Image (tube, rainbow, N blue to C red):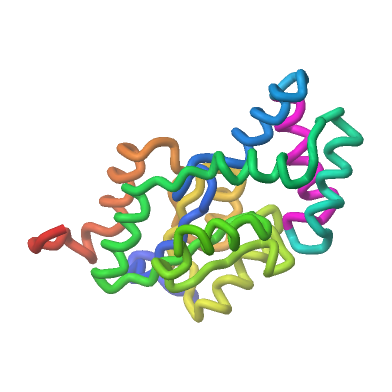
Amino acid sequence: MPSDPEFKTVNTVLFDFGGVLADEGFRDGLAAIGKLSGLAEQDVVVKGHELVVKTGYVTGRAREGRWWDALRSETGVRGTDEALRLEIIGHFTLRAPMLDLADELRSRGLTVGILSDQTNWLDEIDARFDLYGRFDYVFNSYHMGKSKNDPTHFDDVLKLLNRQGQEVLFVDDNAGHVSRAVDRGWKAILYRNQEGFLRELSGQLTRKYPESSGKR
């Protein structure tokens, strides 16, 4: 007999990284690279997103150099791998309020994690800021071999969590990823801005997890 979603309590919150826990460094970094190369910024952004999937870099099937070679070849971007990668990584500015929120949810007994389509750059950001230590799980497409473009990726994550879909709340700024999560039975919030997100989060959690009366 199928479970009734009304009786499923959210006990796990998974956050996207770029665009939620941090500024969208991949997009903004590609735009900056396009500008520095004298190219149309949006063209470089679109091609960069296309090639990170096409080359297999985002799912760990290709090394970083292959992606840079493809990007230079198809857009005319100029610069060494190292200079270009620093441009992108430097645009991933962590959002302290979102990280503090993850800490708070964790202190209230919820499981918190990162579910992101990222590359080895996320590991480098962790090495610099000790990001992973603030989360119970980190699901990075580069290490998992699947991205959120594949609906079965959400099923794989549920198995690793040992959860049912209605127990997991997913937060992402990509409407397609949110839609695929919902289609797989998850609860989800499309992140547009922090104020709107906090209202939606309260609606998802308040009934079962009232705000703590202690110091926040």
Q: Please report the residue visible at 26 percent of the width from the left and 51 percent of the height from the top.
A: 202
User: Where 78 sits versus 62, above or below?
Assistant: above
Q: Is residue 49 magenta?
A: yes
Measured as percent of width and height from the top left, residue 97 is found at 32, 47
User: What's the magenta region?
Assistant: 42-58
191 lies left or right of 56 = left
Measured as percent of width and height from the top left, residue 182 is found at 53, 55
Q: Please report the residue visible at 66 percent of the width from the left and 28 percent of the height from the top.
A: 31
Question: Which secondary structure is most common in the magenta stretch?
Answer: helix
Q: Please report the residue visible at 66 percent of the width from the left and 65 percent of the height from the top.
A: 153
Who is closer to the viewer here, 108 or 36? 36
- Camera sees residue 8: no
Q: Please report the residue visible at 30 percent of the width from the left and 37 percent of the height from the top.
A: 195
Q: Is residue 8 magenta?
A: no
- Camera sees residue 39: yes
Q: Quadrant of residue 147?
A: bottom right
Instruction: Please count the marks in the image.
Output: 0
Query: For the view shown, which residue lies furthest in the right direction?
Result: 73
User: Where 143 sits versus 62, above or below?
Assistant: below
Q: Quadrant of the C terminus?
A: bottom left
70 lies left or right of 113 = right
User: Where 34 sits versus 212, above or below?
Assistant: above
74 lies left or right of 172 = right
